[in-house]
Image (spheres, rainbow, N blue to C red):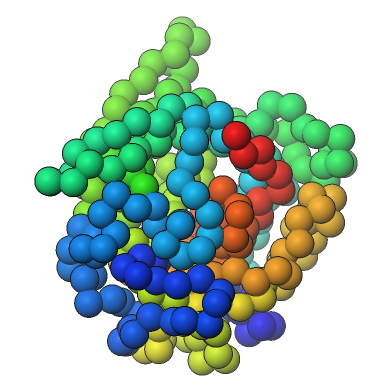
């Protein structure tokens, strides 16, 4: 598993959980229905439930992520320097809240949808007060994103302050056939493409060795124990009380979704995320 950290510096269609029944995936772990909006037997079902990870969101669900932003290293001309000498900021807390739950039509299928608000957390719980920094002054005061139960994106709403201190907002419709990524937003809100990938029963060494090489990685997702966490998040992880070693699904990054994610059963958010923007861990949640 140590190789994972060195390399770090989705899944549906009859997919099974940790009971040992893996899907019949090919190169990259893509199911036969990868070109469709969803697998035929997935219509109306939550991708999380199909994977054995839990249920879809309910209004009132909340969770908190400790996020470490990666500093802009665009001044580095050397590609090796960019990858090997990246610098990071101190951990900061990001809060998530499910504002509403509804339904929407996708072709001839109606699926549940949920809208989640994301913003820098302004209050710091006691266990983390000496371990995290003050809220980051983000470009956006808040970002609301809407996804359906297969985690296909629907829309994003951005809220920011203008020069007079007034809140202004605008909404962007998203392509439901794409992935919800966080690479261009000021707060993290991405997910792996979990509705059309079948996880393997176990990860092997090759998966982690080729984690960032999806064209030659033998599959895209697999069940295994948790990864080693970056040093800057170890103390925060200890304070959270979450068992990060417990088994979950590892999702390898793809060209469309460049973040590696580890998601444990019962969690409302990936337990660990690492990508070009930085890395973060889930530190608390409150399920309705």
Total marks drawn?
0
At a point 36% along the width and 20% down the height, the residue shown is: 169
The foreground one among 111 and 226 is 111
Q: Is residue 95 above or below residue 208?
A: above
Q: Position of residue 67 (x, y in %)?
A: 64, 49
Q: Is residue 234 above or below residue 161?
A: below
At a point 53% along the width and 60% down the height, the residue shown is: 53
- In the picture, residue 23 is in which quadrant? bottom left
Residue 149 seen in the figure: yes
At a point 49% along the width and 49% down the height, the residue shown is: 55
- In the picture, residue 16 is in which quadrant? bottom left
Quarter of the picture holding the C terminus: top right
Compared across the picture, whether 8 is left or right of 145 comes to right
Q: Is residue 29 above or below residue 139?
A: below
The foreground one among 193 and 189 is 193
Q: Position of residue 161 (x, y in %)?
A: 46, 17
Quarter of the picture holding the N terminus: bottom right
Compared across the picture, whether 10 is left or right of 171 comes to right
Q: Position of residue 17 (x, y in %)?
A: 51, 71
At a point 20% along the width and 58% down the height, the residue shown is: 37
Q: Is residue 145 above or below residue 149?
A: above
Residue 75 seen in the figure: no
Compared across the picture, whether 141 is left or right of 255 comes to right
Q: Position of residue 15 (x, y in %)?
A: 39, 71
């Amino acid at each position: 598993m140590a190789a994972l950290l060195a390399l770090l510096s989705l899944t549906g269609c009859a997919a099974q959980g940790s009971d040992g029944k893996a899907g019949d995936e090919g190169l990259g772990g893509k199911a036969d229905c990868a070109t469709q909006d969803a697998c035929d037997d997935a219509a109306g079902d939550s991708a999380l439930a199909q994977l054995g990870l839990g249920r879809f969101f309910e209004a009132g669900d909340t969770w908190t992520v400790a996020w470490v932003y990666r500093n802009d290293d665009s001044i580095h001309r050397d590609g090796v320097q960019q990858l090997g000498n990246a610098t990071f900021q101190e951990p900061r807390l990001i809060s998530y809240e499910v504002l509403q739950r509804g339904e929407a039509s996708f072709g001839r299928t109606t699926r549940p949808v949920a809208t989640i608000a994301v913003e820098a957390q302004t209050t710091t719980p006691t266990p983390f007060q000496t371990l995290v920094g003050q809220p980051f002054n983000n470009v956006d005061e808040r970002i609301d994103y809407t996804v359906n139960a297969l985690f296909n994106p629907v829309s994003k709403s951005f809220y920011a302050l203008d020069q007079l201190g007034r809140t202004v907002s605008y909404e962007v419709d998203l392509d439901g056939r794409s992935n919800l990524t966080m690479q261009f937003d000021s707060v993290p809100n991405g997910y792996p493409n979990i509705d059309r990938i079948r996880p393997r029963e176990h990860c092997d060494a090759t998966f982690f060795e080729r984690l960032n090489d999806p064209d030659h990685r033998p599959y895209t997702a697999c069940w295994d124990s948790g990864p080693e966490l970056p040093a800057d998040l170890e103390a925060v992880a200890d304070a959270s009380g979450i068992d990060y070693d417990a088994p979950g699904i590892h999702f390898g990054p793809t060209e469309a979704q460049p973040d590696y994610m580890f998601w444990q059963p019962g969690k409302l958010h990936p337990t660990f995320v690492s990508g070009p923007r930085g890395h973060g861990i889930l530190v608390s949640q409150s399920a309705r």
